[in-house]
Amino acid sequence: MDSIASTRNSYSSAIITNRIIYRVARYWLIGFLFVTLLWVILPWLAPVFMRLGWEAPAQAIYWVYSFQCHQLPQRSFFLFGPSTMYSLDQLPLDQPELVNPLALRQFIGNATMGYKVAWSDRMVSAYTSIPIAAMIWFIFRKRLRALSIWVFVILAIPMAIDGGTHMISDLAGVGQGFRYTNTWLAELTSNSLPASFYLGNAFGSFNSWMRLITGILFGFGLMFFALPYMRDAFQDMARSIEDKFSRADVDL
């Protein structure tokens, strides 16, 4: 009797598990959008919580996202202050702190300047473009084919180059490398653009535009490459469960 009861329980558990998997396979895109939207909204809530005086949840968000992003304030958006971004010389830090990446990471802002978003501007553009691209793909999914791996690589290369050159530039010290001054670009364009376009990371500068554009290219490329394959995989999973339940004459 015990073995029969155990078999029935296992059978019931298998049915329940398959029904859960089936629902996930049918509505996977809704779950994907929910998770990715939540992931891109949370960094913006950190400065909101700081503004409200809710330091514990704000610090928790900064801590979680610190594993994914450098969170350098000179490359981050700020909320509730007079400026959306600040240069190194505008930060209220001592000189040793201004050249110390760890000290810079720890600066989240204040009531006068506002508080930084828990992501850098590159992370904002790259990850925010993921749910946006997913929604666009869903609307036009019947007309779109999956991008080839080579097209995706081509779209990802600009961000790799931009991020890689920033990393190499930072080896010279914070605010000292060739990507901070962009003298090479000024010479290439005969200084035809305002000095603020070449220097630093402020919103509207060359560095800011490059992080924004390359992040969007990566996010859209990733989604238009991966989502068709994800759809096919989940559809196959759903059909497989439908067939099993049909053969067993069990309702889903």
Image (spheres, rainbow, N blue to C red):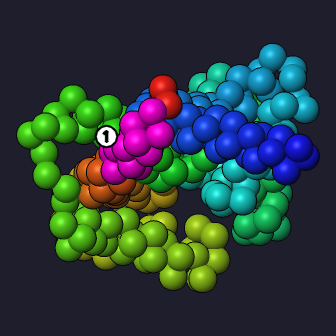
Residue at the spot of label 1: 133
Taking 176 as reference, is 63 above or below it? Answer: above
The answer to whether residue 131 is left or right of residue 88 is left
Which SS class for mark 1?
helix
Given the image, on which type of amino acid does mark 1 rest? Ala
Q: Quadrant of residue 172?
A: bottom right
Q: Is residue 217 visible?
A: no
Which sits in the foreground, 158 or 200? Answer: 158
- Please give the range of residues in magenta: 234-249
Which residue, as the protein is rendered here, is positioned at the far left?
Answer: 143
Image quarter hosting the N terminus: top right
Question: Is residue 158 part of the magenta span, yes or no?
Answer: no
Q: What secondary structure is the stretch in magenta mostly built from?
A: helix
Residue located 77% across and 24% down the image:
49
Q: Position of residue 174 (x, y in %)?
A: 63, 70
Q: Position of residue 208 (x, y in %)?
A: 41, 51
Which sits in the foreground, 145 or 41? Answer: 145
Question: Is residue 238 part of the magenta span, yes or no?
Answer: yes
